[in-house]
Amino acid sequence: MACSGGGSWWPWAALTAGVGAALAWSNPGPVEFEAFAGEQLVELASHELCGSHGLPMVVQLVVRDCPRLIASQRHALGAIAAQGTHRTNLGLFSLYTTEVGGQAVLPGVSVPRYQALTLAGAGQLVLLKASSNTEPAQR
């Protein structure tokens, strides 16, 4: 007597293997993460440094377009984030744990510290958790 459903699991196994391979292949790598992190840091730094309580008044007089100045440093900020990041590659997806900041950008002004956890998978990067000290350190 032949089992009627005996061979029906092969298509599902092949489909599952194909989906797994597609996810692993489309897992964003360090280059994509660096670009993503640069965008995120531009947004955060612009918000924190370019607001009324960000840079000291003397610096605000010299820096006329703070958001544009920070945006022009997108690639450099991405590289800084990449240096402060540990990637855990789990095949189908990756977790990026990042901690950056604290560097002095001007005498008496330091970049705020940021910590982030990012999920990378299926060609996407998603910020799962982010925190920062809320004000730039001013001495």
Image (spheres, rainbow, N blue to C red):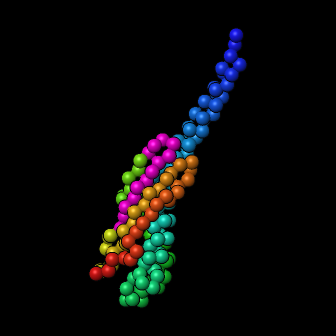
Residue 34 visible in the current orientation: no
Residue at position x 40%, y 74% from top?
134
Tag count: 0
Please tell me in which quadrant of the rendered image residue 112 appears.
bottom left
Residue at position x 70%, y 10% from top?
1
Is residue 109 left or right of 8 when viewed as pictured?
left
User: Can you give x and y, in whole percent of width and height, for residue 92 in the image?
Assistant: 51, 42
Prevailing secondary structure class for the magenta stretch in the rendered image: strand
- Quadrant location of the C terminus? bottom left
User: Can you give x and y, in whole percent of width and height, for residue 5 in the image?
Assistant: 69, 22
Magenta span contains residue 78 = no
Residue at position x 52%, y 57% from top?
126
User: Can you give x and y, in whole percent of width and height, for residue 29 in the image?
Assistant: 48, 49
User: Which residue is at the front of the view, 103 or 73?
Assistant: 103
User: Which residue is at the front of the view, 15 or 80?
Assistant: 15
- Whether residue 50 is situated above or below residue 19 in the rendered picture: below
Please give the range of residues in magenta.
Answer: 89-101
Magenta span contains residue 94 = yes
Is residue 62 left or right of 24 when viewed as pictured?
left
Please tell me in which quadrant of the rendered image residue 77 appears.
bottom left
Residue 117 visible in the current orientation: yes
Residue at position x 60%, y 35% from top?
16
User: Can you give x and y, in whole percent of width and height, for residue 136 in the image?
Assistant: 37, 76
Q: Residue furthest top?
A: 1
User: Which residue is at the front of the view, 3 or 25?
Assistant: 3
- Whether residue 88 is situated above or below residue 115 in the rendered picture: above
